[in-house]
Image (spheres, coloured by chain):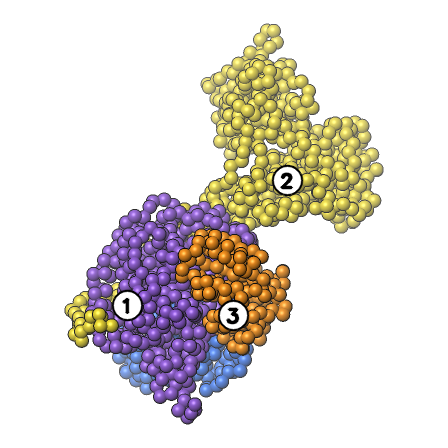
Amino acid sequence: MNNNFVKGSWQEILDWAQNKSINMLHYCTGCGAIELPPTMTSRYDMSRFGIGPAATPRQADMLLVTGYLSTKTLRRLIYTYEQMQAPKFVVGFGSCTINGGMYWDSYNTIKQLDKYLPVEIYIAGCMPRPEAILDGLLKLKKMINNGEADGYKRYEENLEFYHQNQEAVLGEVQRTQ
Amino acid sequence: MANDKKSIFSPVTAFKNLVKKPETVRYPAESNDAAKRYRGFHINDLEDCIGCSTCQEVCVNDAISMVEMLDVPAEEGQRSERPQIDYGRCCWCGLCVDVCTTGSLEMSRDYSYIEIDPDSFIVTPAEKDINQVDHPLGYLRDEHSDLLDLKRIDMEMLEPEERINSFIEIVEGFSKEQAEKEASRCVECEICTDTCPASMNIPQYIRGIFDDDLEESLEQIYEDNPLPEICGRVCTHTCEGVCAISHRGEAVSIRWLKRYAVDNVDSADYKKVLGTEKIEQNNKKVAVVGAGPAGLSAAHYLSVMGYQITVYDSKEKAGGMMRYGIPEYRLPYDALDKDINYIKSLGVDFVFNTRIGENITLDELHEQYDAVFAATGLHNGRSTRVPGTDNNNVYQAVNLLADIARGKEVPVTRNLVVIGGGNVAMDIARSMARIQMDKYGEVNITVTSLETEDIMPADQEEIEEAREEGIVFKPGRGPKEIEVNEDGTLAQLCTNCCVSVFDEEMNFSPTFDDSDIENYECDMVIEAIGQGGDNSYIDDQFEIEYAGPRIKINDYSQTSVDWLFAGGDIALGPDVITAIKTGHDAAVGIDMYLNDEL
Amino acid sequence: MRNEKELLELINVHLDPPAAEIKRKQNVSVSIKQENLIQALSFLKSHSYQHLSTISCVDWLDEGEFELVYHLFSYDDYINISLKTRIKREPGVFQTAKEIWPVAEFYERDIHEFFGVEFKGNDNLEEMILENWQHLPPMRKDFDTRKFVNDNYEWRDYNGQKHTD
Amino acid sequence: MDKSTQTEIFFGPNHPGVPGNYGINYNFEGDTVTAAEANAGHLHRGFEKLMEERIWIKNTALVPRICVEEPDINEMVYAMGFEAIGEIEVPRRADYIRSIILELARIQGHIFSIGGNAAGIGQYTIMNWGTLTRDYILDIFEEITGARVYHIYIRPGGVRQDIEAETFAKILDLMNELENERFPDLEKTLFENPNAQKRWQGKAVITKEEAIEMGATGPVLRANGVPHDLRKMMPYAAYDDVEFEVPTGDNGDAWDRIKIARDDMLQSIKIIRQLINKIPDGPVQTDLGNGLKYRIPKGDAYVKIESKRGEYGYYMVSDGSLKPYRVHVRGASTPLGLYGVREYLPGTRIADVPVWAKSLGICPPEFDR
């Protein structure tokens, strides 16, 4: 961390501060959410890393997509994501977010999360163990610290692309961003 | 509610945890290893894996797909494909491990894989898992979780003391329940199809039996094999040798299943099922020489294509070696006739007791027919040519077998020796055993062979059954001399120890050790050390190329003489199914030749 | 406290079902003509079968029929009745049971959503689980989910690494 | 009614107070709910359709996903349905193991939901303890089945693998630890806590008549003094071999339901001890032949078991092919989550809405499916 100060760019200081305190939006989108309580609470206690739950989108930096997304949830999730303040980071949990996973032939779930939202990292598993989740979050912290977690920028740059894909499955979507 | 104990101070007990050791697992500082059955990432032993794709079959999420791996050599009964696992689909259920036919696919205890790039979540597992690190083994299949049915249904057979008294067929065949249960064991990997000389649609007809749709099975079988009753009994079944199930259990009884399927379709329905009630004739004529498996196969496929077929044979009935070489207890004549009669019913003409070269020359056939298919087989027994073989108590197995088939009285004595270790030797020994039993009420037969038992060419079950029937084996002995008494009767067979049968180049050149001599008393000797053919009817008239002892043919069984096609033992050995294939190829070839496509 | 036999008698006497059998211990299956079903439900409810587990619908495409199965349970007899009736697939209209069991309203709503069965007398049949669903009701046998997915989504090909066959 | 005093809010799906990805839209006046409507379906994956697409054995991997809170009940009901239609006998040892698994699942489910309920009234310590305790049971599961949450362990014909003796020992140790250390702490900090009692007593009342009318079972029904439990009424697995009482309450309120959860866990511990003491030897799986070719005759069966939230049932139809023709899932909290919200939530005060939703054990995935 210190060398950050030495190099001394303001953004680097922000990134450093950012990675020390991440607020995770408390939204259980899918089954993977069942492994969050153990991660959050006494057994694996992720607040050791300055990560804690936040109740509302506006206070949250990190959105965990815990597994599959039904189209109905995807709509809510997009609203949620667009309400969140930048910088904001999306973590994909398990197979479902990568290539459909268990629900590869389901008529009601999306298959590739990164077509609809910018994803920073993916954690393999169905669902991932708390240890794997911690590994993922630690990696995310490192990325943030190095200023590599730039999903929210990608989202703004490729707004067109994301909106198209979203509307392809959802039809009309209300926009706040 | 009043009965509920309550005190404002009781929650204070929570504070005692202040002095307790925290229960938090300080991951990653202290790591918490997964349990020993943990279902983590896959690992696969690429050496053991045979690419049977059963894991792909069972995968719940279509996460497994087979990828071509050229660096792994595809041996007999293997594919050069290996499973590739998509961790964007996998749900770590472990069914692929439970169903793996070789046991090569396993799971490690590794559970953590984080990546930025979603396209990196696909891997072809090898000794190391997706993280390319070594991890202790995790979930392993055991006998309870095993999803394969490893135990085959035992085939009912006659008891030795019962079967030795007659030529009644030994194998009794499956019942419907047995057949469906046995058929259900197939995992439809099609490795058998790759190995079958005629590449039959084995999984397809087994599926037909499983679905109790025998007509479907019959169609699938006749795609590549017009003699299923015969193959269902005497095929060398290389398919069962490579069956994926055989790696951890007993192979599916493919041969008996085929037999069940055809046994249980009434021959009257054949034409309806196979759609041969009405065949478009194309007014072209083809002659087939030899009514053995190759000839019959060619005749069948050609006549289905609409050709007018005439089959010539020197014997009085069709079937060739299948009738005159294989004893009735292995292949009953009515089974043989069921197949042959169906081929007859397609309009094939048979001309018996006619030997090409004597009664009619090949040239004349060439003039009368558009093409000729020659499959005359190997009918002349070879002799060991040791001293004494000229004695008239020394016989050739093939001649005796043919006489037995004709129902002729054959000479038999109390005490006889068979020389040879192949299936023909078994056939003659077991046939003579039955006749001995009938005549003298006891079996006294010794079989000597150059090969030791482990390299004897005969089928293992043949040898065992022969033993059960009281036949004595003396493997690894070379015949030295047949000693003859003054009165011309035989005294004994004198043998020496055969040290090795083949030389380094695996050519046949036996070496003997004369210090080790054994004599077997006998009053009759039968030689069954192989047969030779007589192709003079071709050679007299045409210059034809040979490949070693056999006639050279191309992929369409065509010889160097363009209108002459050849198959069966004279072209390609050694078994029925190969002969059937050459016949099928010839049919295709002749069709192309007569349409100027070859 | 009736046993299965007595229950079957009771049913045979009062409801003249085309078919009624004891499936397993504590499980009875009864087929009822659709016109008698509602009356049968209220009859059974009045005979201690007060617990409606759920209403299942089965699409028998080849017969061109929907089968509605009402699962009832009695806290006196400890017996489970599966009360079955068949209705024509087209137009697929039936009576509501919400007068007898108000909760049936939601089971019917669910069936309407996934099979397209109309329930006369139930005015609360709008979309509940799905959102803006434009296609065939998904649980119908003639709705092919794999085809639907192939048309509407695409699967990752991992830059051509994935071998599909 | 005067609209100006009316407010409508969308409670969930994105809200810490709702049980999972599920919403309730309600109007309130002052701070009292006047009308409510469930907003379900966010977890719909079309399980019933997917199961029709897959052969029997593949579905064993699919079913646990239907209810993440208590996956094993799905495996059990599915296996029971298969065995009922196919008239398949299960080895006795497998029955015992199944019961042990189900009771462990019951404990982890209850302790987890007690934690959730406590969190709903701000008792975060209890939530931490609950989740922690559950995790120790998950460790046992991991050792037995090879996975923490989705075990894929109970299979048609028996269970996937046998349990070793040392694992049984571990289970018994854990049971003692729960009974002698963790539950007493819980008792003191939660159940003797006047604050907690005040928040729960007399809240979210569902009377016996209401419960039976809408088909609510389990704690909701038992909180009214009726010991209706499928483990007693229609014994399955090895429950006919063990002694246990069915805990009940008197007032049908949240407090009673939570006490029932607590007593249920004590009973489960009792059951597990009995089962482990007299578990017979023998195989744990009947031979059903090639897993790719499981086939059972035409037929149908409605099978149900007692989950921690009440009756959990499958209606399964087989047409004699390699795949199920139809599987219909009846989640335990379906009537409450859809019908109960509209009928019985109004009248509750806003602060008690989480208490209402959580204490009734509403689990959205099982009615979204």
Q: Which residue is mark 1?
A: D259
Q: Which residue is mark 2?
A: B264
List x then y, in percent, for residue D12.
Answer: 40, 79
Chain B colour in the picture: yellow
Q: CA distance from mark 2 to mark 1?
A: 67 Å
Pick the quarter of the image with the N terminus of chain D: bottom left
Which numbered disc, 2 or 3, marks the residue closer to the eye?
3
- Looking at the image, is D241 positioned above or below residue C106? above
Question: Is residue B340 or residue D149 the one in the foreground?
Answer: D149
Q: Residues within 10 Å of mark 1 (few under 14, many from 20)?
A: some
Same chain letter for marks 1 and 3: no
Q: Residues within 10 Å of mark 3 (few under 14, many from 20)?
A: many
List x then y, in percent, for residue B506.
Answer: 54, 34
Give the residue at x 79% y 36%. Answer: B349
Q: Is residue C136 left or right of residue D128?
A: right
Residue type (three-letter) at the residue carrying disc 1: Lys
Please give the letter of the chain rendered in purple: D
- Looking at the image, is B344 positioned above or below residue C113? above
Same chain letter for marks 2 and 3: no
Element at label 3:
loop
Residue C117 seen in this snapshot: no
Residues marked 2 and 3 touching at CB (< 8 Å) = no
Residue D5 seen in this snapshot: yes
Q: Is residue A115 left or right of residue B385?
A: left
List x then y, in percent, for residue A68.
Answer: 45, 70
